[in-house]
Amino acid sequence: RADYDALPESQRTGLSFERYLQERVTQAVSSVVALLKDDDINRYVGLLADGVWAHASVQEGGSDTRNVYEAFTDGFADTRAWVEQGLFDFVMLKDYTATTNTSAAFGTVLTWWSDLCGAAGVPLYVSHAAGEAVRSGAGWDASDQLAQQVLLCQKAAAWQGSVFHSAAALIARL
């Protein structure tokens, strides 16, 4: 907050503290990507994205989700803009909810990101919460939950593949 408060009033006019934080995060991320690309122009740099950029009820263009962490409004990370601007070569989406989740259903989150990545020409990969498949939480008690998710992925135009986070927990239960 001290950096923002230290700005001359002329630079703060019309710039909310939240917008200032978003710009600082974008500046930092852009600088890191530029350094990585300057070191090796052929290096692929990807974005590990939280499931929800913003809720549609909070931000125009957001997803039909609610009551979960939003990268843009809670974390000040404008991941949507970064993808639209072509900052990253691919996106790895952390979509760790079940298909039946009432706040951020797996399919709803997947479709939002697939639409975004497809429009930007950026490949989309999905990280599934494989460790949840061995628990009995809401939506995860269905033995075919991961299979349902992969089937949804196969229908998503920008989807290029999946990884299964914490597969060790899943394998241990076999």
Image: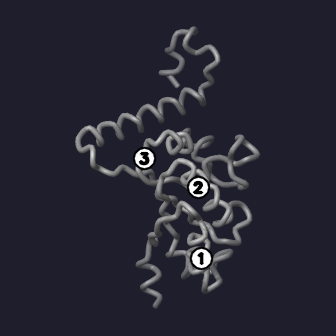
For mark 1, does the 10 Å Cα neighbourhood hold few (<14), some (14 to 19), or many (20 or more) residues?
few
When asked about the image quadrant of residue 157, the answer is bottom right
The chosen color scheme is one colour
Q: Is 114 left, or right, of 108 in this rendering? A: left
For the question of whether residue 93 can be seen, the reply is yes
Asked if 65 appears above or below 25 in the picture, the reply is: below
Q: Nearer the viewer, residue 158 or 76?
A: 158
Going by the numbered disc 1, the residue's amino acid type is Leu
Q: Earlier in the sequence, mark 1 or mark 2?
A: 2
- Residue with the mark numbered 3: 88
Q: Secondary structure at mark 1?
A: helix
Alpha-carbon span between mark 2 and mark 3: 14 Å
For mark 3, does the 10 Å Cα neighbourhood hold few (<14), some (14 to 19), or many (20 or more) residues?
some
Q: Nearer the viewer, residue 42 or 34?
A: 42
Q: Secondary structure at mark 3?
A: loop
Going by the numbered disc 2, the residue's amino acid type is Trp
Residue in the picture at 54% in, 33% down = 22
The location of residue 16, given as percent across then percent down, is 62, 24
Q: Is 132 left, or right, of 141 in this rendering? A: left
The location of residue 142, given as percent across then percent down, is 65, 84
Q: Earlier in the sequence, mark 2 or mark 3?
A: 3
- Residue with the mark numbered 2: 113
Going by the numbered disc 3, the residue's amino acid type is Phe
Asked if 35 appears above or below 91 in the picture, the reply is: above
When asked about the image quadrant of residue 17, the answer is top right
Alpha-carbon span between mark 1 and mark 2: 16 Å
- Residue with the mark numbered 1: 151
Disc number placed over residue 19 in the picture, else none: none
Q: Nearer the viewer, residue 100 or 62?
A: 62
The location of residue 12, given as percent across then percent down, is 58, 15
Q: Secondary structure at mark 2?
A: helix
